[in-house]
């Protein structure tokens, strides 16, 4: 049997707009009403673009969990999800390491995380065939509820410059 050499799709989603209440730890911040609406639109857009993930790696923060729960509700699918404390604290190198550990049979992976890690990871992974305008935009940072689509040759071989950054979808 030949090994699977098909392209994988990596989606890097920044959580939706969150509240900034006083006297609450950052990890406990909930989504705002705007963020709740953004999250539902994210799920609908992923479904429309036929980008339903096989696996979701989600930061353990309240706002990322809420973003995923609301996106999933409008996605029309219920993929496996792993809530990871490591994603709350992860920089781009740690995020890439987490993605490299994903099983080879996962074709589409969604990571729900935080800035600046989402934009820095997209920029770090982007190789020479990436869309130049999209790369320039992610280098500036990404707004809440936006997601980058990267094509990856394989999870275990993922390194800086080895993916193709195709698009950045901004909240609608």
Image: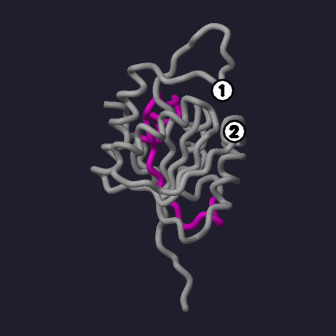
| Occupied quadrant, residue 148 | top left
Image: magenta residue range: 133-158
Tell whether label 1 touches label 2 (CB within 8 Å): no
Q: Can the viewer see residue 127 in this picture?
A: no
Indicate the quadrant containing the C terminus: top left, top right, bottom left or bottom right.
top left
Residue most extreme to the top = 22
Residue most extreme to the left = 48
Q: Can the viewer see residue 51 in this picture?
A: yes
Label ID, residue 27: 1
Residue 155 highlighted magenta (yes or no):
yes
Foreground residue among 19 and 126: 19
Which numbered disc flags the more N-terminal residue, 2 or 1? Answer: 1
Residue 76 highlighted magenta (yes or no):
no
Indicate the quadrant containing the N terminus: top left, top right, bottom left or bottom right.
bottom right
Residue at 58%, 44% in the rendered image: 58
Q: CA distance from mark 2 to mark 1?
A: 16 Å
Residue at 51%, 76% in the rendered image: 5
x then y, percent, for residue 2: 54, 88
Q: In this figure, which residue is indicated by the disc labeled 2? A: 91
- Residue 73 against residue 52 in the figure, above or below: above
Helix, strand or loop status at disc 2: loop
x then y, percent, for residue 18: 51, 21
Helix, strand or loop status at disc 1: helix
Q: What scheme was used to colour the molecule? A: one colour
Residue at 62%, 7% in the rendered image: 22
- Residue 52 against residue 26 in the figure, above or below: below
- Residue 157 against residue 134 in the figure, above or below: below
Foreground residue among 50 and 78: 78
Q: Is residue 46 left or right of residue 104?
A: left
x then y, percent, for residue 3: 56, 83
């Amino acid at each position: 049997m030949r090994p699977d050499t098909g392209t994988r799709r990596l989606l890097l989603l920044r959580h939706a707009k969150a509240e900034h209440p006083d006297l609450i730890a950052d990890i406990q911040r909930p989504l705002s009403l705007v963020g709740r609406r953004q999250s539902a639109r994210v799920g609908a857009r992923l479904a429309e673009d036929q980008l339903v993930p096989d696996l979701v790696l989600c930061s353990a923060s309240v706002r990322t969990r809420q973003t995923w729960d609301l996106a999933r509700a409008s996605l029309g699918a219920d993929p496996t999800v792993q809530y990871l404390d490591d994603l709350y604290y992860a920089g781009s190198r740690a995020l890439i390491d987490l993605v490299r550990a994903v099983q080879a049979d996962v074709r589409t992976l969604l990571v729900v995380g935080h800035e600046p890690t989402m934009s820095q990871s997209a920029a770090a992974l982007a190789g020479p065939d990436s869309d130049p305008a999209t790369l320039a935009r992610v280098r500036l940072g990404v707004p809440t509820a936006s997601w980058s689509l990267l094509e990856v040759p394989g999870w275990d071989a993922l390194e800086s410059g080895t993916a193709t950054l195709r698009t950045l979808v901004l909240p609608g």
